Image: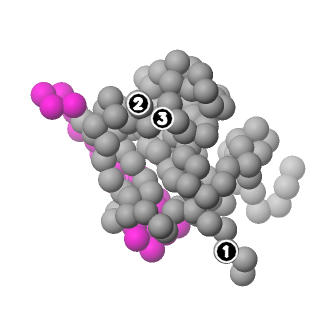
C-alpha cells in the first residue's frame, strides 16, 4: 500500500497512468462499451464492480488534463432519436471542476462512432461495471508541472 494514493486505483492502473505522456488519452468505459474489441491496440484494464464517477475522481487526483487543447475531456454523444437521459454527465462535470479550474468548459462531446474511432487510438481503456448509459468518458493527459 502507498500513502496518498486513492485505493480504488489498482497497481496496473496506477502504472498505466504513470506511463502515459502528454496528450495520451485514456477511456473510462461503461459496462456496455466494447472495451476488448476497441482496445486491441492498447491496454485494457478491468475495473469491474466500480463505477465511472469514483474512478474518474481518483484518476484526476493524479492526472492533469491537457491545457493545450480546448476540450481535454470527451463524452460520447447521445445518438439522435435515442431517448436517453445522461444525469451522470453532471456528476462528471462536478468532479472535473474539483480537479481543473475550467470545469465543464473542459468537456466536449463526440459523436458515438467517432468516439469509438478515437478510443481505438487511446493509450488505455478502463472497463468498468458502470450501468448508466452513455457514461463513457475520454481524458487527454496534460503536463505535470513540478511544484
Kindly report the distance in space between the C-alpha atoms of the residues bearing marks 2 and 3. Answer: 5 Å
How is the protein colored in the picture?
A: one colour
Above or below — where is 113 with respect to 63?
above
Q: Residue at x 61, y 27 (%)?
A: 41
Residue 32: horizontal and vertical position, in percent?
43, 23
Secondary structure category for the residue under label 3: helix
Q: Which residue is mark 1?
A: 145
Q: Which residue is mark 3?
A: 119
Q: Residues within 10 Å of mark 1 (few under 14, many from 20)?
A: few
Is residue 65 visible in the rendered structure shown here?
yes
Is residue 50 visible in the rendered structure shown here?
no
Q: Earlier in the sequence, mark 2 or mark 1?
A: 2
Residue projecting furthest to the right: 1
Residue 116 - label: 2
- Magenta segment includes 49: no
Magenta segment boundaries in residue numbering = 79-103
Image quarter of the C terminus:
bottom right
Kindly report the distance in space between the C-alpha atoms of the residues bearing marks 2 and 1. Answer: 31 Å
- Magenta segment includes 92: yes
- Quick check: marks 2 and 3 in contact, CB under 8 Å? yes
Residue 14: horizontal and vertical position, in percent?
74, 47
Q: Residue at x 48, y 35 (%)?
A: 119
Residue 136 - label: none
Above or below — where is 43 with respect to 69?
above
Q: Is residue 13 left or right of residue 129?
A: right
Q: Is residue 112 left or right of residue 63?
A: left
Q: Is residue 107 left or right of residue 47?
A: left
Q: Earlier in the sequence, mark 3 or mark 1?
A: 3
Residue 61 falls in which quadrant of the image? bottom right
Amino acid at each position: 500500500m502507498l500513502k496518498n494514493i486513492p485505493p480504488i486505483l489498482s497497481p496496473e492502473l496506477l502504472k498505466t497512468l504513470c506511463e502515459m505522456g502528454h496528450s495520451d488519452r485514456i477511456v473510462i468505459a461503461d459496462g456496455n462499451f466494447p472495451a476488448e474489441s476497441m482496445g486491441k491496440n492498447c491496454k485494457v484494464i478491468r475495473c469491474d464492480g466500480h463505477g465511472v464517477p469514483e474512478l474518474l475522481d481518483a484518476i484526476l487526483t493524479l492526472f492533469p488534463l491537457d491545457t493545450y487543447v480546448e476540450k481535454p475531456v470527451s463524452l460520447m454523444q447521445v445518438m439522435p432519436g435515442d431517448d436517453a437521459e445522461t444525469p451522470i454527465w453532471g456528476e462528471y462535470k462536478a468532479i472535473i471542476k474539483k480537479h481543473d479550474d475550467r470545469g465543464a468548459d473542459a468537456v466536449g462531446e463526440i459523436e458515438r462512432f467517432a468516439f469509438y474511432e478515437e478510443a481505438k487510438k487511446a493509450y488505455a481503456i478502463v472497463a468498468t461495471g458502470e450501468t448508466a448509459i452513455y457514461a463513457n468518458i475520454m481524458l487527454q493527459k496534460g503536463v505535470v508541472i513540478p511544484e
